[in-house]
Image (cartoon, rainbow, N blue to C red):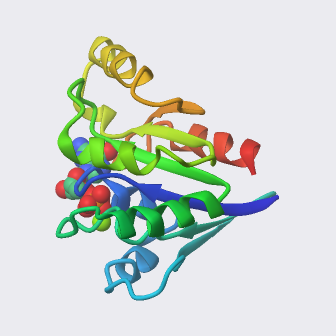
Amino acid sequence: RSGFVTLIGRPNVGKSTLMNQLVGEKIAIMSDKPQTTRNRIQSILTKEDFQVVFIDTPGIHKPKHKLGRYMVKVAETTLNEVDIVLMLVEPTTTIGQGDRIVLAALENVKTPVILVINKIDTIEKQALLEVIDSYKDAYNFAEIIPISAYTGENCDRLLEVIRERL
Ligand code: GDP
Ligand code: MG
């Protein structure tokens, strides 16, 4: 199996860290280069029985960009062309402005969106349950997976869910 996955989320939620955890350091350095073309390949993860091509979504993660109608369209196109969208968030119950912008961009997206609650190494189990609850009504997520990109906790589960959906 193989397919295309894009990783979205506001700055500092841990997108680069997750990429490093899944694929390795070399590629994530590449992903910090200025984005010029649409649907740019960020990295490729090759496992024994599946392969994932990570695609960058231009516009949605650029802190300087106010998502104008054009940028929403560009982002939407990418989001609709991939097989899976991973949306990363912080493990907090408040859904911030940055997260709202990302959720707005997902409004007309048909691709399954997996909510990845990152940095669970920083919170208690009970708090995590509350975070999951607060996101349940925010969007029709295909799955909600808590992970720590930093420690690698539950990242194998995330990969398993990705594999199943390719
Ligand atoms: P990006 O802007 O979404 O690419 O976020 P980065 O990957 O650059 O991470 C932003 C900050 O969050 C860095 O200081 C990371 O070390 C930290 N970080 C990322 N993932 C985790 C995690 O799972 N746990 C903790 N404690 N920190 C994390
Ligand atoms: Mg980054």
Tell me the residue at 21%/63% (across/down): 66
34 and 47: which one is in front?
A: 34
Q: Quadrant of ligand 2?
A: bottom left
Does residue 48 appear anywhere in the picture?
no
Residue 140, given in percent of the width and then of the height, sits at 53, 29
Using residue 14 as the reference point, say whether residue 112 is left or right of it: right
Using residue 13 as the reference point, say whether residue 31 is left or right of it: right
Using residue 57 as the reference point, say whether residue 41 is left or right of it: right
Does residue 79 appear anywhere in the picture?
yes
Which quadrant of the figure contains the N terminus? bottom right
Tell me the residue at 36%/15% (across/down): 129
Q: Would you place residue 15 above or below residue 141 in this image?
A: below
Q: Would you place residue 2 above or below residue 120 in this image?
A: below
Count of picture labels: 0
In the image as oriented, which residue stretches furthest toward the top? Answer: 126
Tell me the residue at 32%/22% (across/down): 131
Residue 90, given in percent of the width and then of the height, sits at 27, 39
Q: Would you place residue 97 above or below residue 71 in this image?
A: above
142 and 120: which one is in front?
A: 142
Residue 158, given in percent of the width and then of the height, sits at 57, 42
Tell me the residue at 28%/50% (across/down): 13
In the image as oriented, which residue stretches furthest toward the front? Answer: 69
Residue 54, given in percent of the width and then of the height, sits at 56, 67
Quarter holding residue 18: bottom left
